[in-house]
Amino acid sequence: MHRRELQEQYEKLLSNFLAGDREAQLYMAQQLSKSLVTQDIAPEDIVDFHIQALEKLVQMPEPVRESFQLLLEMMMEYGNTYRQHNVLRDKQKQLESEIDLAVVMQQTMLPQVLPEFEGVEFGLISVPAKKMSGDYYNILQENDVTFSVAIADIVGKGIPAALCMSMIKYGMDAQYGLTPATRLHHLNIVVEQNIDPSMFVTMLLGNYDTARHSFRYAVAGHEPGFFYRACEQRFYDLEGRGLVLGVLRDAQYPEYELNLEVGDMIVLMTDGVSERKVGMHYLNRQELTNLIQGELAHTAQEIAENLYRRLLLMTNYELPDDHTMIVIRRTK
């Protein structure tokens, strides 16, 4: 509808309203307002319709006429601000839609079913602090007796982190059967070449041989996990040093090896587990192992889930960072 037609329609509506047909015209005004919104008519234009209609219908005192100039100016600024708000709202909706898509993409990159090996049980929990997680994990069957395990923390959030996660996953898949040190070396080159300089990745990657119950691993700046020696009823920090992925192209990663007896357990985690603030202080590693110690009578999966619940309760149900934990225990 052209502006002149809208002006005439509004003038007729106002004339009928002033003539006393108020209830019907108020309803018509509501319908016209909805139509004006769909036609993207600005608030200041509606004020201008009103001024022009009044000038034709009544004799306006000069102060009233001048007051409409103030209202018109206010509506112009209001209209500009309102349009900017709508643009930002549309962009926000688009971003939320993209994030939802990235979340789905993330889920497809994480293992849906864990492999099964006689004599070994797994526990796994991964809870994002927000919609998207910066944590990555994978447990992949290499052959009949060997599986690889990876846990990583991508420093950077949102869609870039999801894209980096996909790069790590497909990079790992392409290096099937290689040693942990070699895999980390190749992944480091891929990450260094393809991610923003402000981002980097910490990672622990290992191979577990279920025939010998040995765990050989390498570390790229990742949070040290724990090794529980059942015969001693004692937790040890996992050894391991190595530069984070994506910083230095020629970085090398030494390998370390553990031999597990029945009841021994490996606990891998991201800093969302270890760096939990309770009250005014952060949990230290001894306090964390004490909590795990209290769950040893349960299965590996129950250990992971129960620890998450206990930490959540201790921190008043606040989750400031992504929480990912992997438990690997030799059962026989």
Image (cartoon, rainbow, N blue to C red):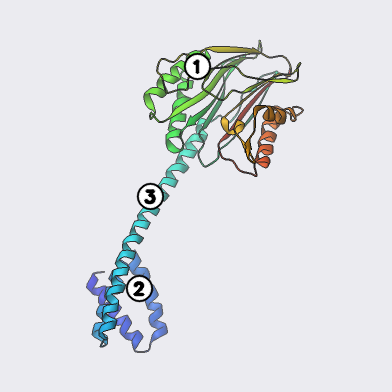
Disc 1: which residue: 176
- The image shows residue 264 at horizontal and vertical percentages of 71, 18
Which residue is disc 3 drawn over? 91
**Quadrant containing the N terminus in the rendered view:** bottom left
Residue under pointer 2: 32
The Cα atoms of the two marked residues, 1 and 3, are separated by 41 Å
Label 2 crowd (10 A; few <14 / some 14-19 / many >=20): some
Q: Residue at x 45, y 41 (%)?
A: 101
The reply to whether dot 2 and dot 3 touch (C-beta < 8 Å) is: no
Query: Viewer-proximal residue, 24 or 317?
Result: 317
* Residue found at x 67% / y 31%: 304
- Callout 1 environment at 10 Å: few (<14), some (14 to 19), or many (20+)? few
Q: Quadrant of residue 226?
A: top right
Q: Amino acid at mark 1?
A: Tyr
Camera-side residue of 139 and 189: 189
Name the residue: 39% across, 74% down. 30
